[in-house]
Amino acid sequence: MEPWDVIPSVDNGPFAVKTLLGWVINGPLEIHATSNDTYVSVNRVDAKLMNNLEEQIRNQFNHDFNERTIDDKCEPSKEDRRFIECVSNSIHFEDGHYVISLPFKSENVCLPNNRKQVEQRLSSLQKRFSRDENFHKEYCVFMNKILEEGYAVKVPDEKVIQDDGQVWYLHHHGVYHPKKRKLRVVFDCAARYQGTSLNEQLLHGPNLTNTLIGTLLRFRQDEIVIMGDIDSMFYQVKVPQEDASFLRFLWWEDGNPRKRIIEYQMVVHLFGATSSPSCANYALRKTAQDYKGLYNTEVINTVLKNFYVDDCLKSVKTVTEASSLLCDLQDLLMRGGFHITKWISNSREVMTNIPVSRRAKEVKDLDLENDTLPIDRALGVQWCVENDVFCFKMDIKDQPLTRRGRSRVAPLKQTTIPRLELTAATVAVRTDKMLKSELDVPIDETVFWTDSMAVIRYIRNTSSRFHTFVANRLAVIHEGSLPDEWRYINTKQNPADLASRGMSANDILQGKHWITAPEVLLAKNDSWAEKPMELSDEIPVDDPEVKKITVRAVIHTRESSDNHVDSVERLLNYHSSWYKLKKGVAWILKIKKKLFLRTQRKTQLENQAAETCLSAEDLQEAEVAILKFIQIKSFASEIEELKKGHPVKLSSNVRKLDPILDDGLIRVGGRLHRARS
């Protein structure tokens, strides 16, 4: 595993290596002759999760396949509001710069004294200097600059012994820029001691930076572009004197490790503190707000909308506008203590009007009339200044090539094609919303194109009820667009399909669809075909995304007596015992009664608990019902005579039993009849 940093050993002891997984201790241990055991004590180990590829993919899927509406925005948190309150109450202008207090989470912050720890790190830095003389020289140049510029000052002698919990010492180490190979000394505000760090005590603050894509979009808006950089932006915002004690660091006199160690303290917001980006952006915006009466709207809006941290990227229509804006912008920022420089433009005429000292180093020595303008970096993107286009620089390694990611891939969890196409439609709607909010161009109408007729049917349909996944995405689409704004494009003319199918590099260069868009989009809009055929808005009956409607009905039919008898007889013959038969019939009668009562007085039964057992009365009622059925089947004529009040016929088999009709049931008469009398 590649080492990121190394803390050398002392007296041939262990040494520490910083890797992707954290700090690792290696090397020999001091073994005393009087002991056979070797012990190593680790005071604290911190493990921090890092964003890996899997998490990035998951975040992308959550963005594309989320359930939120189109206008969902991150509201400021409670800590964000506290940050704004702290900064707005403390900011003031002093000696040509804005001063902002460190935004601590607690009003009564108290930190342990970590000087000993910082001394050990300084000792490790000394060993690195002894091994790398060039690194030592570059380090000293940087430290001398922050001292000469007044970004750091020596701690007064009477304050050196301060130990009241209001002091914190910062580790510092050198980091080379991966592209420029320029050394920057970083103060490690995240270094922990006794369970805490400076960054853990500070409020991060809200994100006051313009979006990266929005800044680049506005940069491509007009013909003439200019780009500049605020010199040491964070260092232009100072901290009050009482907060400087939290930003102390150790450094040798004259940068010579053989000389004594001196205590210094930063008096500005520094690179590495979690609160610095928000504090610096707040001060930059405050500059525009405080002096908006002295400059035109274009200058003020440039500060508010065309900066990404310390980089200014602006496009205008004419050379005159660019030159005027450049001068006014420099003057405005100087009032706030910011110095913008390193200017570069795609217009040679604009570059001519910029003093050489304020040009970017890539164009300082150019002959603007004859030399080709260089390739520069604009927010991490390669910008060919001569042709004013973004480009890519690739180093092809001498090894077998692998296939790599076309467009956005589908999730591993199986998703139907219509759902994927509908998700793409929601991405289009959100992209349209983003473009309208980021571009300074009035957009009267938006046209959305899809090669999915199913998506168009879904969007136009207003009567079908869809499953949750489809319904949520249709809600986003309907909120951000109108059905009439959606048009059909044939798959063969759809440039988005090229990304999903894949193309060779040669086909991309020779083809037109991907670079210049299909011809149908370049034609007049009245010639745009909405669909290749008459497309019905009706959703097919068998569409799996439409909720199926289940109709439940109770149908009452008048059966013939023979059918009725057959069905009951099948029920009687089904059961093998008298008790099971009574139980089955009892449940049928119980359910029949409940259904009947529910139709008569539904509201009274809604809160009744469902019954799960039979009572003795239920079984008795079932027994009577069974006997009545059997008697009707066997003694129908006898029952009819008894209902009329006549005795049964002489030919009846039950005449000798003197039968009577008791509540619809034939019973034996005789003594029972006389007893009742």
Image (tube, rainbow, N blue to C red):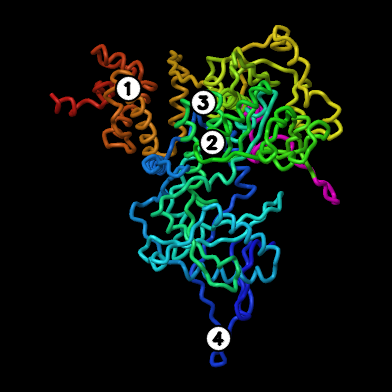
Identity of the amino acid at label 2? Leu
- Quadrant containing the C terminus is top left
- Magenta stretch? 395-424
Q: Residue 295: which disc?
A: 3
Q: Residues under labels 4 and 2: Cα distance? A: 65 Å
Closest to the camera, between mark 4 and mark 2, is 2
Q: Residue 37: which disc?
A: 4
Closest to the camera, between mark 3 and mark 4, is 3
Q: Quadrant of residue 436?
A: top right
Which residue occupies the foreground of this view, 525 or 402? 525
Q: Residues under labels 2 and 3: Cα distance? A: 11 Å
Q: Residues under labels 3 and 1: Cα distance? A: 78 Å
Q: Residue 598: which disc?
A: 1
Identity of the amino acid at label 3? Tyr
- Identify the residue under disc 2: 333
Disc 1 crowd rating (10 Å Cα; few below 14, some 14-19, many 20+) is few
Disc 4 crowd rating (10 Å Cα; few below 14, some 14-19, many 20+) is few
| Mark with earlier residue (3, 1) | 3
| Mark with earlier residue (3, 4) | 4
Instruction: Indicate the secondary structure of the residue bearing disc 2.
Output: helix
Q: Is residue 411 above or below residue 47?
A: above
Instruction: Indicate the secondary structure of the residue bearing disc 4.
Output: loop
Please name the residue shown 73% across and 40% down the image: 364
Which residue occupies the foreground of this view, 87 or 94? 94
Q: Is residue 145 above or below residue 496?
A: below
Q: Residues under labels 3 and 4: Cα distance? A: 75 Å
Which residue occupies the foreground of this view, 224 or 382? 224
**Residue 230 x/y as whole percent:** 59, 41
Q: Residue 609: which disc?
A: none
**Residue 565 x/y as whole percent:** 44, 21
Please name the residue shown 45% across and 27% down the image: 569
